[in-house]
Image (cartoon, rainbow, N blue to C red):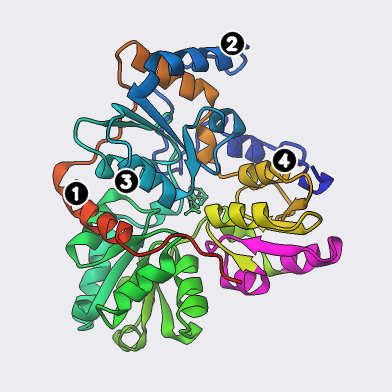
Amino acid sequence: MSDLLHDPTPTPLALLLMGKGADPASERGVECPGDLPAASDPGLVERARAARAALAERVFILGHHYQRDEVIEFADVTGDSFKLAQQAAAHPDAEFIVFCGVHFMAESADILTSPNQQVILPDLAAGCSMADMADIAQVEDCWDVLTEAGIADVTIPITYMNSTAAIKAFTGRHGGSVCTSSNAQRSLEWAFARGEKVLFMPDQHLGRNTAVLDLGLSLDDCVVFNPLKPGGGLSADELRAAKVILWRGHCSVHGRFTADEVDEVRVRVPGVNVIVHPECTNEVVVKADFVGSTEAIITTISAAEPGTAWAVGTELNLVKRLAKANPDKTVVYLDRTVCFCSTMNRIDLPHLVWVLESLVADKVVNRIEVDADTKHWAKVALDRMLALPGAAATRD
Ligand code: 13P
Ligand code: SF4
């Protein structure tokens, strides 16, 4: 592995990012209620294996690409948020779905699985700072603003997977769809076939990058709705003139990458290919060579010629694994400093062992359950996404 991937000296912030301590600002922001095994217990791997074997077909473990290695080792399937949603829906026989990812993903799994299946999130503090940037009351207020401007009936809401079940349900009720980074282009095309405008929540960067780079709209076709300002900080005329109304939200991990870092890595690693996630800012994405979801990033680098060099703009756990899995290529991290997703990292081996051993003892802990009405309408929006043709594509 290249030394360009070394970890910097741990700081209190880095320790928090690594999942030690509580982050009161996180989506859930709670400590785990259970008696966790000590992280120093040398028998943790054996305990996880034993519990996994005892549960056999009763449990199916999903692991998002940003999870720690110690957790990924126990995943029955790994994937991006789109693939994991499909996989949750495709395993109706598993009594328990243990979702090693974040809260909104576990909610989506609960929505897509049958009532006799139970979805478990090993640490309830594994939220998402982007999902936190939109709550349902704000979204309803926004819709009132669009109604007053006379555009709600020609606007199709699209919500990124990274949003609460309540916002997915709102989207389903108002004729819209969910999207992920694998299918944002197809979702926006689907929406523009049904309305004149799109309200895109909550990631302004994914919405802008897709509208401008994939649909050929201009930056001026997009406006940013700030839920913290009256009327979103926009006049009725600005809203009427816009084609895409972007919610003012972003990912705290991908929002860190800068256009300067792209320039710097091209000097540092001659001939490097820069590949980034579409949650990065438009300035970064336009300077990159490739952009794609986590699954598309993995596929592109795995299929690349030996000897090629890659600078990757996404979460560090995934970049480290990519470097390890591609020893014939140079894989470096685009950021200058540590950039783990603090909430993804909350799921660790002690939490996984705790939930699996609890299940072996017939105790369901940390169940994620969406109420029936929210579930119904959120499923409408999720099913619209799952019915879109095709899967991930990488833009060149
Ligand atoms: P994907 O899994 O869709 O690539 O999204 C990345 C992410 O930030 C998940 O929270
Ligand atoms: Fe949320 Fe960003 Fe972490 Fe994904 S990487 S879970 S969008 S904070």
Q: Position of residue 92 (x, y in %)?
A: 27, 35
Q: Position of residue 109 (x, y in %)?
A: 32, 42
The amino acid type, in three-letter code, at marker 1 is Thr
The amino acid type, in three-letter code, at marker 2 is Gly
Q: Which label sits on residue 108?
A: 3
The magenta-colored residue range is: 260-289
- Of mark 1 and mark 4, the one earlier in the sequence is 4
Number of residues whose C-alpha sits closer than 10 Å to that of mark 2, classed few (under 14), some (14–19) or many (20 or more): few
Q: Which residue is mark 4?
A: 324
- Mark 3 vs mark 4, foreground winner is 4
C-alpha span from label 1 to label 4 = 41 Å
Please say if the residues under marks 3 and 4 sit with CB atoms less than 8 Å apart. no
Please say if the residues under marks 1 and 2 sit with CB atoms less than 8 Å apart. no
C-alpha span from label 2 to label 4 = 25 Å
The amino acid type, in three-letter code, at marker 4 is Lys
Residue 386 lies in quadrant: bottom left
On screen, residue 24 versus residue 189, left or right, reads right
Determine whether the residue tagged by mark 3 lies in a helix, strand or loop.
Answer: helix
Number of residues whose C-alpha sits closer than 10 Å to that of mark 4, classed few (under 14), some (14–19) or many (20 or more): some
C-alpha span from label 1 to label 2 = 41 Å
Q: Disc 1, ligand 2: is the CB inside 8 Å? A: no
Which part of the image, by quadrant, shows the N terminus? top right
- Of mark 3 and mark 4, the one earlier in the sequence is 3
The amino acid type, in three-letter code, at marker 3 is Ser
Q: Which residue is mark 2?
A: 43
Residue pushed farthest left?
Answer: 373
Determine whether the residue tagged by mark 1 lies in a helix, strand or loop.
Answer: helix
Q: Which residue is mark 1?
A: 374
Q: Is residue 39 magenta?
A: no
